[in-house]
Amino acid sequence: MTSLSAKDKDTVKAFCAKVAGKEEQIGCDAVSRMLTVYPQTKTYFSHWKDLRPGSAPVKKHGATVMTAVTDAVSKIDDLTGGLLSLSELHAFTLRVDPANFKVLAHNLLVVLATVFPNDFTPEVHVAMDKFLAAVAHALSEKYR
Amino acid sequence: MVEWSENERSIISNIFSNLDYNDIGPKALVRCLIVYPWTQRYFTSFGNLYNAEAISTNPKVAAHGIKVLHGLDRALKNMDNIKATYAELSVLHSEKLHVDPDNFKLLSDCLTIVVAGKLGSAFTPEIQATFQKFLAVVVSALGKQYH
């Protein structure tokens, strides 16, 4: 797992600034895609009444997740420390298999490509991919 | 054997009939070489791959991207027997090209993202699911002859 270079961090910060205000839209779309394209992820949401793309619980959860991702940008210099309580939540309460972090990350990248076709260049893509991997790694810290 | 509904067949057919191979092919391969730089190991004969700019303007990369994308035409024409259709290409990638089959998934993820960028919101979750299913079947077939 490589750490983020100064250039990666700058690229991530600059790109994520464009996401501001669109957290619900992007998060909802990413979660919708995850549930549709990777149906096994639905197993974590059996308590929701409606798992259809764009439904109320999907929108709400998408906003929660995406806001947390953009918030993680502000903690980019110490993701492990900054995401400690979220890691404990995912490890002890939610018990999400960490393989799913990659799945959600992929769907987030797909959404970013559709929303920002010109800005989501290969260079931005690699920096965001590394950033999301680093976030996933920090979230997995407390698992075992 | 992989089952395809009429809806899935028509989704795949529509995506490819509206695809500009000369645009999407190079973009997908360029993205793969930049996002997953270790994939450059297979292209040492392509010349300058030193940075994103060089990769993006390298004519050999572009030509190869188009070639690889056309490789998917075989699956398009033989959706009910993708495994057998790619047996020969699988042997080629294993015995002659020595490509780690994990790389097929990396390229297929980049292709998904490039197509998503092109189609925007028209690339719905349902269409994404079908496209990824198609690519996964091709990727699996390409890995079948490795031993």
Image (cartoon, grey):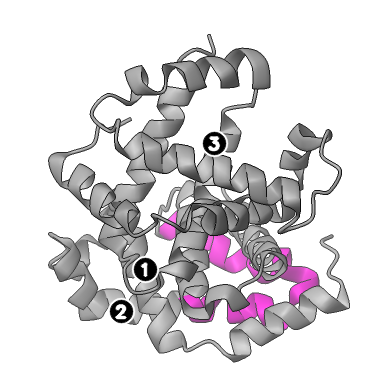
Q: Which residues are magenta?
A: B69-96
Question: Which residue is found at the position 86% from the left and 65% from the top?
Answer: B3
Residue nearest the observer in this picture, B48 or B9: B9
Q: In which quadrant will I find the C terminus of chain B?
A: top right
Image position of A121 (left or right of B13): left
Q: Is residue B5 above or below residue A108?
A: below
- Chain letter for mark 2, please: B
Q: Mark 2: which amino acid? A: Ala
Which residue is the site of mark 1?
A: B29
**Callout 1–callout 2 Cβ contact below 8 Å:** yes
Same chain, marks 3 and 2? no
Q: Main secondary structure of the magenta part?
A: helix
Quadrant in which residue A137 is drawn: top left
Q: CA distance from mark 3 to mark 2?
A: 32 Å
* Label 2 Cα crowd, 10 Å radius (few <14 / some 14-19 / many 20+): many
Residue type at mark 3?
Phe
Q: Residue furthest top?
A: A144
* Foreground residue among B137 and B146: B137
**Marks 3 and 1: which is nearer the front?**
3
- Label 1 packing within 10 angstroms: few (<14), some (14-19), many (20+): many
Q: CA distance from mark 3 to mark 1?
A: 25 Å
- Kind of residue sitting beneath label 1: Leu
Residue located beneath label 2 in the image: B62
- Residue displayed at 55% across by 53% down: A24
Image coordinates of residue A67 in percent, x first then y, are 47, 42
